[in-house]
Amino acid sequence: MRAIEDILKYSEEKHLTLPEAILAMDEEFSGVPEGEIRTKIFSRLKDMARSVSESEGNEAPCKFLPITGEPLRGYAERTSGGLCGQFILDASAKALEVATYNSTMGRIVAAPTAGSCGILPGLLFAWKELRADEYEDIERRLVDALIIAGAIGEVIANRATLAGADGGCQAECGAAAAMGAGSLVFLEGGTKEMVADAVALTIKSVLGLVCDPVGGLVEIPCIKRNGMLVALGALAADMALAGIKSAIPVDEVIDTMSRVGRAIPPSLRETSQGGLATTPTAKKLVGALKKRSIFEDQE
C-alpha cells in the first residue's frame, strides 16, 4: 500500500469498512487470504498485550535510566489523573514500561520499530481499559485498530521510511504516534477521513524530529519520547474527531516527512554524533558506562 487516499477510495467504492478494505487490498496484493491475515494480526495483538503485562512487572535495570512507569502511575493515582488526565497518564506509563522492557531485552512488538515500541500498545491498551465496560467485542475492535495501524505504517514505510538512521525519530516515534492516532479515531467511531486527518496532524507536528540516542542505546531520549508522544497521538485523534482537518493531504504530509528526513544531517540520524548524545552529561554517562563495562569484563 502506497497511499492512504487509495485505501479510502477503495473503501468507498467497495462499500467496505476501513479494516475490511485494508484486508481486501492486502489479499489482492499478497495472495494471502483475509482470514489468515486477520489471524496473524490477532497473534501480534496478543504478543503486544503480553509485552504490556510483562513490562509492568519488569525490574531489570536499564544501562542509564531507572524505572519510569511506576512513578508516573503513582502520580496519576495521587492526583486523580494529574493535568493530562487518566487516559494519557495510563497510556504514557504503559509506553514507558514497554520501551524500557525493550531496552532490557524483553520481548516486544516492533510497532513499527523497537525504538518506538511503546507508543502504539500504550494507546491501544489504555483505550481498552477506558472502554472495557462499553463493548463486548473489544478484542475484535482492537484487531481492527491494529490492522489500520499496520496499513498506516506500511504507507509511511513505502513513501518515506520507518528507520531513524534514514529519517530521524520522526520516522520511528513519529510514525508510531500517527499509527496510534489513526487507530484511536477508528476505535472512537470516527470516519475514514478523520483517520487520515489524525495521521496528517500527527506527522505535521513531528517533522524534523531527530534521532540522537545517548551512547547508541535505545534509552535516552527514546524511552521518555515514547511516553511523551502518546499524548500527541491522542490529541491528534481528538482534534480529528472534533472535525479539525489537515490543510495538507495526508499522503503529501508523508512525502514531506521523506524529504525532511533526507535533509536531516547524518549526525542527527541515529549515529549518536549530535543532539542530546553530545551534551556534556551524555558524554559523562557514556564514559562511566564504558568504565563499568570494562570493570565487569575483568571480573
Image (tube, rainbow, N blue to C red):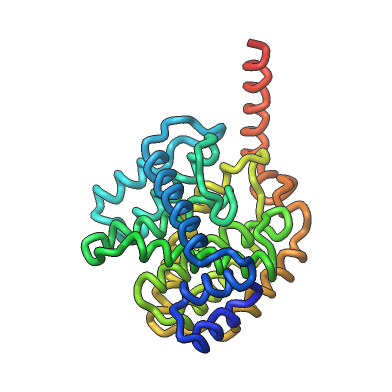
Q: Nearer the viewer, residue 191 or 29?
A: 29
Q: Nearer the viewer, residue 253 or 295?
A: 253
Residue occupying image coordinates x 54% and y 63%: 150
Q: Is residue 83 visible?
A: no
Q: Residue furthest top?
A: 299
Residue occupying image coordinates x 58% and y 49%: 115
Name above or below for residue 51 compared with residue 120: above
Q: Is residue 15 visible?
A: yes
Q: Nearer the viewer, residue 19 or 299?
A: 19
The percent coordinates of residue 99 (x first, y second) are 50, 45
Quarter of the N terminus within the rendering: bottom right
The percent coordinates of residue 292 (x first, y second) are 62, 21
Quarter of the C terminus within the rendering: top right
Name above or below for residue 61 compared with residue 75: above
Where residue 132 sits, quadrant-wise, is bottom left
Q: Residue furthest left?
A: 133
Name above or below for residue 240 compared with residue 219: below
Left or right: 172 as drawn, with respect to 121: right
Residue occupying image coordinates x 47% and y 71%: 182
The percent coordinates of residue 208 (x first, y second) are 66, 65
Where residue 124 sits, quadrant-wise, is bottom left
The percent coordinates of residue 226 (x first, y second) are 50, 53
Q: Nearer the viewer, residue 27 or 179?
A: 27
